[in-house]
Amino acid sequence: MVFKHISRVAAVQMMYQKDVTGEMASDIVVHFNAVLADDERYRHINLKFFNRLISHFDENIDLNVLIDDTFDGRKNLNNASLLELCVMKVAIIEMIFEKTDIPVIINEYVEIAKEFVGDNVAGFVNAMLDKISSRIERKCQTEA
């Protein structure tokens, strides 16, 4: 659904802002929601879904360790782009906390990676999310 896609894109952007600034998501969410409200690109955002995703950003889940443990030696956290990492982090959060089918999640975030970083990393993001999906424990919430 396009409304969820827009929500996922916005969540990746907020994760990027969080990682760049080092602030807690809870500290930047008010400003970020104001930006979403003023930007025409986000007029169809599913705010309920977006807010559910970002509500888990500050939880005690070491996403970097999960990602780093999955690298196959070609890359690691030090040479992956911040955007690649942010895409994977939000995808992992959705895998853990939402009931969305894992293949749907992987497909959505591969498409988002293409939008942000380009087609050349889509295969890498796909492979990483596929490996990570088999290692996570789901704590699903309801769909919206």
Image (cartoon, rainbow, N blue to C red):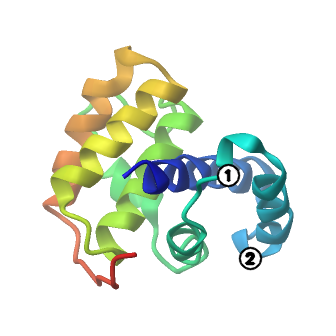
Q: Which quadrant of the view contains residue 128?
A: top left
Label of residue 65 in the image: none
Element at label 2: helix
Residue 131 lies, in percent from the top left, at 17, 49
Image quadrant assignment for residue 134: bottom left
Question: In the image, what residue occupies the spot 82% across and 73% down?
Answer: 27
Measured as percent of width and height from the top left, residue 15 is found at: 62, 54
The local crowd at label 2, few if under 14, some if 14 to 19, many if 20 or more residues have their Cα within 10 Å, is few
Q: Amino acid at mark 2?
A: Ser
Q: Nearer the viewer, residue 42 or 131?
A: 42
> Where is mark 1, residue-wise?
43
For residue 26, the mark is 2
Mark 2 or 1: in front is 1
Residue type indicated by callout 1: Arg
User: Relative to 38, does residue 118 appear above or below in the rendering?
Assistant: above
Q: Compared to 14, does 141 lie above or below?
A: below
Of residues 85 and 117, the one nearer the viewer is 117
Depth order, front residue of 74/141: 141
Asked whether, in this view, residue 107 is left or right of residue 21, the answer is: left
The extreme left residue here reads 134
In this rendering, would 98 be left or right of 7? left
Q: Quadrant of the C terminus?
A: bottom left
Total numbered labels: 2
Judging from the image, what secondary structure is the residue with disc 1 in? loop
Which mark sits nearer the N-terminus, 2 or 1?
A: 2
Q: Residue at x 77, y 64 (%)?
A: 33
